Image: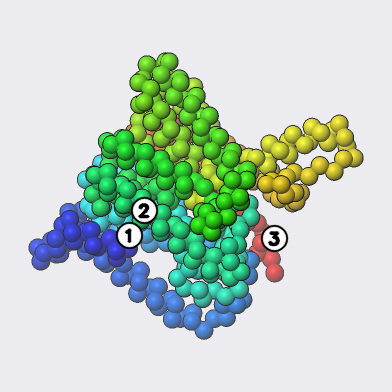
Amino acid sequence: MLTSLIFSVWYNPVSSKNLLFFSPANDFLPILASGLFIGILGLILWLSNDSLNQNSIGKREGYIIVVFTWIIISLFGALPYVLSGVTHSYTNAFFETMSGFTTTGSTIFSDIEALPKGILFWRSMTHWIGGMGIIVLTLAVLPILGIGGMQLFVAEVPGVTPDKLHPRITQTAKRLWMIYVALTLVQTLLLSLGGMSLFDALCHAFGTMATGGFSTKNDSVAGFSPYIQYVIILFMYLAGISFTLHYFILKKQFSKVFHNEELRHYTQILVVSTIFIAITLIVVDHMPARESIRHSLFQVVSIVTTTGYITSDYLIWPFSTWMLLFLLMFTGGCAGSTGGGIKIVRIILMFKNSLLELKRIVHPNAILPVRLNGKAISQQIIFNVLAFFLIYILIFAFGSLIMSFLGLDFESAVGSVAASLGNIGPGLGVVGPVLNYGVLPDPAKWLLAFIMLLGRLELFTVLILFSPSFWKK
């Protein structure tokens, strides 16, 4: 949080006059006060618990720590918004913070460019931290959790089965973060070469690599040059790929990358969807070919990777195009990426299992395992995938129903829940790509914040805490 002070001072030099009060015009004191308060509180808690046996952390404790860490850092991360007065509603501040840490990218602000630079940087920083995961960051920097580390890693890293790149979980976390930081720095450099200021380049790189979508501009990235938009497209695509594959690329193990089924299907979905939308825009809206391809590619990659940046209001496109984008909200990126959603690998396994069920009906005695990348997948994982999909759809349905009870029309209700559960950001209706979530009633914001957490921690990590058996000895 205190790193935001650099940009606060740079863009609004501190003087004795503006240090005397908390206000949107002076974000230095609110950020400083928030950072010092959280730092002192954290130090007190750390010192008071230093004697605990951390080797006692097991799977159950791992889930509890992960869930409550995300809730608590969102509660405290909202302080700069409230203290600076950019919003006087703690509900709005918490919503914005949870949206940041879960890399959703939904915002309650209507005039983003009016926010002070320190607040804007903190807003983007929440994305970047949440992208790879706060617990993974802790494991990489402070390897003090001992044998409990694997439980925390499994509870947080997206996907069916997170691959261990190194026998020690702390080394795995460090390698993931090294790749994450390196890609962020490269994108920042390329954006700066395209004419972006260092501040804008950093904030948009944070939002891209985290697949978050917070921008420093009211029109997202629509006002930037085609070069910058293509750079963001490239890094959104890379962020939607499993970071394990990035590691294999660095180790020159290209065969593991080229033969990865999830990566192949992920790319195919992007290409086919882009072609369909581009042709529709050319034929129906008579949009120039070059422009239609760029807008189509950008929106498809942004939605599938759950980033949420926009270059155009897709709700004014032909109905078939934005309905396709709505369906793509449920796909998500690859397992092990910073993206949200159901994940491509789960969709692959469901389709394969469904096709094999047809064969099993004809050949009931045949042993027909589902295979991924040439390896048989255990039935337990298939059951887990099917259960995940069912619960995902049920949460979407019940969430949409509750949102409609809170006064939203059908389009806005389903759009807001789909965008929050998939950690995407822009939805449909009153929460469409050129609008914001500030118009929603407070109960709807709290509900969507909880749904964002469910989506970011992949349902089971949160829902298991509501199971009575989980708390039994």
Q: Which element type, helix, strand or loop, lies under badge 2?
A: helix
Quadrant of the rendered image containing residue 77: bottom left
Pick whichever, 236 or 62, lies toward us: 236
Q: Which element type, helix, strand or loop, lies under badge 3?
A: helix
421 to the left or right of 5: right
Q: How is the image coloured?
A: rainbow
Q: Which element type, helix, strand or loop, lies under badge 1?
A: helix
Q: Residue at x 41, y 19 (%)?
A: 282
Write down the residue under mark 1: 79
Residue 106, x across and y down, in percent: 39, 43
Q: Residue at x 52, y 54 (%)?
A: 249
Residue 128, x across and y down, in percent: 40, 55
Write down the residue under mark 2: 186
The mark lying in front, picked from 2 and 3, is 2
The vertical placement of 141 against 129, above or below, is below
Write down the residue under mark 3: 469
**What separation in Å lies between label 2 and label 1 (alpha carbons)?**
31 Å
- Mark 2 or mark 1, earlier in chain: 1
20 to the left or right of 454: left
Residue 382, x across and y down, in percent: 72, 46
Say which mark, if any, is on residue 140: none
- Mark 3 or mark 1, earlier in chain: 1
